[in-house]
Amino acid sequence: MKKIFLLLILLSQLFYTTKALENPDFSFWKRFDDEILINNLVESYQNNLDLKIANSKIKESEKIVKLSLSQELPSISFEGLLGRTFASSNLERGGNNFAINNYKLTRFLLPLSASWELDIWGKNRLKTKAQKQNLKMVEQDKNATLILLESTVATNYYNLIKIDKLIELEQELYNLNKNLLTLLIKKEKTGLANKNDILEIKEILIQNEQKIDNLKTKREILENQTGYLLGDKLLSEIKRKSFSEVKLIENIPLELNSGVILNRPDVISAKENIIRADYSAKAAKREFLPSFTITGTLGFNGYNTLSKLFSANTGLADLWVIPSFDIFDGNRKYNFLKLKKLELDRSYLEYDKAVLTSIEEVNNSLVLLKNENKNYRLSSNILEIHNEKTKLELANKEFGLANEIDYILYQSAQILAQEKYVSDKINYIISMVNLYKTIGGVDFIDNL
């Protein structure tokens, strides 16, 4: 099998265009030619609560970006003032015993105040960029939720089809063993069968019943799980095709380009996290530089009579540039910068981990796909052999060369082979779904 190496991944990043799964893509699922499956996926996209929560988190992150952007813009406020001053005659001003006579004064102040921190060093812009990167990470979390959702829905769907068929086959096997028991009881009465053969068949019948009950329990659990994924509070019956209608995708590639892992949401998110951490570290470094804030007021300042408030001589305006520089802050900025640099170092490690995890999971998925492909082909051949043997035994029975008991045993062996075939075929499809999930929800048939 072709292994995916880290060096190839790093080189391929220069040339490979990643795919962000923003909207559901049905191209892969349409290859199964199953409208019921597509309808289930659409229903899960519309109603699944995990996906709705992920969408809500994206909206929250968008608001956080806007909040950060607001820090870059000037703020304007209105701060009106209405005051009444009472002063006594002993209120002195200046020297030479100058005193103001007793008076009362009403003051009306209607100014607009503005304040704007000049982002000379780009500190606030970097903070906004960091929040935008965080938004991209949250979007990738949603993509991961979406890929997991559709893969789980599809896996459950095909497992339900498998269980339906296995229950049907196991019931056929139970009926055959029941007929066999009846024949053996008759033969025992004539001395042509012993008690041990009858007891063995009775034990097999009990095992058949247990298997049917276990399969029905698994089916009910899967239906409940799928109902949750589809957001169905009533847990209605899960629609699905029969096993005979299931189609396999032809020409499945058993080896993939090393760049496929770049489509994975965890790898994309880890890359975006490096950029976010870098912005945050740069912004923390620029906190050491002085800041400059422009403040000003514009309005009216009147006394005693409200009607004179808007007179020409009551205008009020001022403009200030206020520099600010921290001389000592208890090493707060220094430790904050160290913290952000540590976050940046960790983000590189997390990216390496995401890449290595992706390599492992994709390689494992390819191994499983190859193995399930081989199992399916072999079980198909074995089933064909049993079908032929059963036909020959039926012909022998019709010509009197075989008895009913022998024919039932051949039928039972055929059903067991069919059960293996059903399991291997569905497991092969599920391995395709698993590979689709591990490479990041990309149609890997023709697109790679």
Image: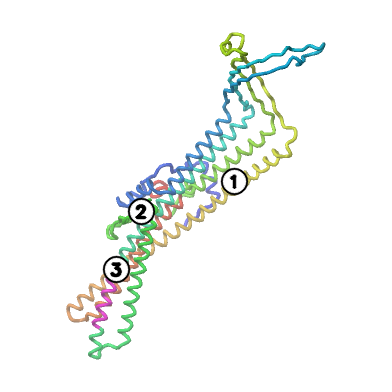
Disc 2 to disc 1, C-alpha distance: 39 Å
Quadrant for residue 131, please give it: top right
- At label 3, which amino acid type do we have? Leu
* Magenta residues (range): 168-183
**Considering depth in this image, is 46 or 2 the residue closer to the camera?**
46
Residue 180 versus residue 205: which sits nearer the camera?
Answer: 205
Identify whether 63 is placed above or below 241. Answer: above
Q: CA distance from mark 2 to mark 3?
A: 29 Å
Closest to the camera, between mark 2 and mark 1, is 1
**Percent position of residue 233, x then y:** 36, 52
Q: Position of residue 53 (x, y in %)?
A: 45, 46
SS at circle 1: helix
Q: Quick check: marks 3 and 1 in contact, CB under 8 Å?
A: no
Q: Is residue 11 above or below residue 72?
A: below
* Residue designated by label 1: 347
Q: Secondary structure at mark 2?
A: loop
How much space separates mark 3 and mark 1, taking CA atoms?
A: 53 Å
Q: In the image, which disc is placed on residue 152? A: none
Q: Alpha-carbon neighbours of circle 2 within 10 Å: few (<14), some, or many (≥20)?
A: few
The residue beneath circle 2 is 251
Q: Residue furthest right?
A: 96
Identify the mark nearer the N-term, 2 or 1. Answer: 2
Question: Which residue, given by chain and number where applicable, does mark 3 sit on?
Answer: 169
Amino acid type, mark 2: Asn
Q: Please tell me which residue is depicted at 61% across the width and 39% down the height of the picture.
A: 278
Q: Point out residue 151 in the picture as x, y percentages from the top left corner.
A: 41, 53
Estimate the x, y position of residue 18 in percent, counting from the top left.
47, 43
Q: Are marks 2 and 3 in contact (CB under 8 Å)?
A: no
| Chief SS of the magenta region | helix
- Residue 76 among those drawn in magenta: no
Q: Looking at the rendering, which quadrant does residue 193 occupy?
A: bottom left
In the structure shown, which secondary structural element does the residue marked by tag 3 occupy?
helix
